[in-house]
Amino acid sequence: MKVVKFGGSSLASGIQLMKVLDVVKNDDMRKIIVVSAPGKRFSDDTKVTDLLIDCAAKALLLEDTTEIFNKIISRYRDIVLDTGMDDSVISEISGNLTAILKSDKSNPDQFMDKMKASGEDNNAKLVAAFFNHQGITATYVNPKDAGLFVTEDHAGARVLPESYDNLFALRDYSGLVIFPGFFGYTKSGEISTFSRSGSDITGAIVANGVQAELYENFTDVDAVFVVNPAIVKKPQQVAELTYREMRELSYAGFSVFHDEALIPAFRAGIPVHIKNTNNPESTGTRVIRERDTSNGPVVGIASDDGFCSIYISKYLMNREIGFGRQVLEILERAGLNYEHMPSGIDDLTIILRENQLDATLEAKLIHELTHKLNADFVSIERSLSLIMIVGEAMRQNIGTTFRASRALSSANVNIEMINQGSSEVSIMFGVKKDDEHKAVQALYHEFFQEIEV
Ligand code: ASP
């Protein structure tokens, strides 16, 4: 059995739904279909999820929602009309959204999640109606009925382990199961959503639960590229990646697949196959446990901006027991999440996403770190980008760091920081944001340009 997830752009119009139909019909192992909300039809279109967020925000401010409500319904209506279905499903969707809009708003996060989740939930009903209309038996299944339970962290929910056993029963449906992505239910019966793009996570959870042979993730690109095509034109495609490589790459800016979505697939050893709805013949990218690594030390280069570094130095830091713990305690009390912590003998640097740190918090943090730790010097540098070069084969190859730093120095990029984890799956470089593109291009040139596609 295969679990197949279709992203928003694959479900944005009637034409797209016809492609989805072909994909599903082509392989009768494709039994469980996880759907996103309708996404963008063209580059500056708005995703239904974003319309729902706007609508919820207006409702919370007690503003008029008529116009945005109509816009949302017309997105579904266009799809229904395109596919020649009657509009009974539209009445159902419209009734559902009206009821949610009227529901309790005393907990704004809970209300916002209910609105957001309705995008996938209503789309799953629509897609099920579409398959039945096309003569293929399909059943919409609600995550509550299937026992997909999650934590109460709205917009950042985590799956509760018992869900996996509950979901196994999805195997028993005859015909297709159409399952909405992006959300589950808390034990108290409330909707809670995963982080944005979280339908990928649902797909992986369901694949694990039903013990699928394969989790297929259909999107709108042919494959994962070795580097962001917005930075390097027409980069090479990646045929195979290990879970660890994909995890490192998607964390650092590879947006094709949600970084949290790998864990459930990885735990169950289910391969993930990323494919293109608009070009299903293309081979796509397979994410697996082990791969042949003879094609070079680096499999991909990812980068992301919006980081800052906190630099702390203190003479004889290396002899002071508990110094690191105290630093992390200060961060924890300030509610800050850190990403990396490279250290030297007398100094350490903490890298975090800079949007967590406003000017007031920054000043407070510098003050606390300086005085509580008696540090000699504390400074914060903003506007940094992190670049990760990733590849399992780095472990067996000597000189990858040398090649990378040589490429960066030839491109006149100053390396602000460098960090290689003991797993040796990735090397991270911190550079100034202004140098990010130049640096990524130089690294691509070094590791990929000579290799044939
Ligand atoms: N529709 C949601 C979003 O736009 C979830 C998803 O598409 O995966 O984030």
Image (spheres, helix red, strand yellow):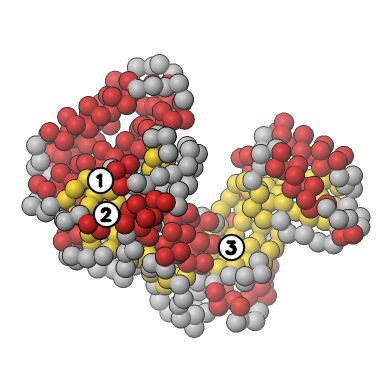
* Residue 265 or residue 20, whichever sits in front: 265
Q: Identify the residue shown where x is 63% and y is 67%.
A: 427
Which amino acid, mark 3? Met
**Mark 3 vs mark 2: which is more N-terminal?**
2
Image quadrant where residue 99 sits: top left
Q: Residue 170 bears which disc, if any?
A: 2
Is residue 289 toward the left or the right of residue 359 in the image? left
Which amino acid, mark 2? Leu
Is the N terminus in the top left, top right, bottom left or bottom right quadrant? bottom left
Which amino acid, mark 1? Val
Asked if marks 2 and 1 touch (Cβ < 8 Å), the reply is yes
Q: SS for tag 3?
A: strand
Q: Which callout, 1 or 3, points to the residue nearer the camera?
A: 1
**Mark 2 vs mark 1: which is more N-terminal?**
1
Q: Identify the residue shown where x is 61% and y is 56%.
A: 386
Q: SS for tag 1?
A: loop
Q: Identify the residue shown where x is 18% and y is 37%.
A: 78
* Label 2 neighbour load within 10 Å: few <14, some 14-19, many 20+: some
Q: Which residue is mark 3?
A: 388
Q: From the Cβ of disc 1, is ligand 1 less than 8 Å away? A: no
Q: SS for tag 2?
A: helix
* Residue 339 or residue 28, whichever sits in front: 28
- Counting every numbered tag in the picture gives 3
Q: Which callout, 3 or 2, points to the residue nearer the camera?
A: 2
Distance CA(mark 2)–CA(mark 1): 9 Å
Q: Which residue is mark 1?
A: 141
- The relative height of residue 99 versus residue 409 in the rendered view (above or below) is above
Is residue 263 toward the left or the right of residue 27 in the image? right
Distance CA(mark 3)–CA(mark 2): 39 Å
Residue 52 showing in the rendered view: yes
Image quadrant where residue 76 sits: top left
